[in-house]
Amino acid sequence: MQRDVSMKRSLWVTLLELVVGVVLGGCMLVLGSWAGAKLGSGASDGWGDIIGALFGSVLAYPVGFVAGMWLVAWRLRFPHSLWRGIFGAALGLVLVLVLAEPLHLNRDSRVIGTLLYLVPSVVALFGFNHPRHESGPTGR
């Protein structure tokens, strides 16, 4: 019975981490888009602001997502691995960018656009909630 309560709590905390991560990630996406557009304005024959906004949002969203997960885990004193979450977000972003051409993900902007935000979030969520140490049934 104790395991069921712990599993339910873990599921709710993970769901809360996901929601807060998406909200804070969305806020960072807006901020990153604005900063990228400002930094890129005037470059690349008028396309610099658009390129900068896209680049800024793709980089800022995973940062906000991981920060949101961390805030929930820190506040609720839930076990987590911040570095694995950061590594997962970076790995997810790199995977999408590397596999875009071989898997023809870049043929449809909606597909690659969705994957650039979804894959890093999912990989970061799994990495963040992966236990640091495996403990057996004896609790060692």
Image: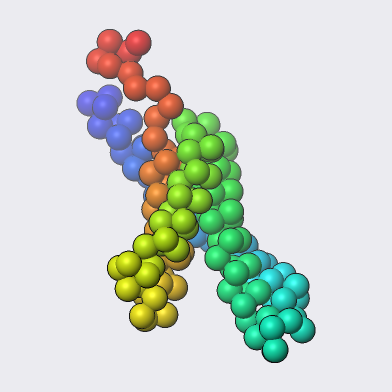
The residue drawn where x is 58% and y is 74% is: 54
- Image location of residue 80, percent across then percent down: 48, 34
- Image location of residue 121, percent across then percent down: 44, 55
Outermost residue, front side: 102
Front-lying residue, 125 or 24: 125
The residue drawn where x is 57% and y is 38% is: 75
Q: Quadrant of the N terminus?
A: top left
Q: Quadrant of residue 126?
A: top left
The residue drawn where x is 44% and y is 73% is: 113
- Image location of residue 36, percent across then percent down: 69, 71
Front-lying residue, 133 or 87: 87
Q: Tell me if residue 50 comes above or below residue 22 in the rendering.
A: below
Say how many tags the image has. 0
Q: Quadrant of residue 70?
A: top right
The residue drawn where x is 45% and y is 46% is: 88
Front-lying residue, 33 or 75: 33
- Image location of residue 86, percent across then percent down: 53, 45
Q: Tell me if residue 57 comes above or below residue 44 in the rendering.
A: above
Q: Tell me if residue 131 comes above or below residue 37 in the rendering.
A: above
Q: Is residue 16 visible?
A: no
Front-lying residue, 114 or 55: 55
Q: Quadrant of the C terminus?
A: top left
Q: Tell me if residue 67 comes above or below residue 99 in the rendering.
A: above
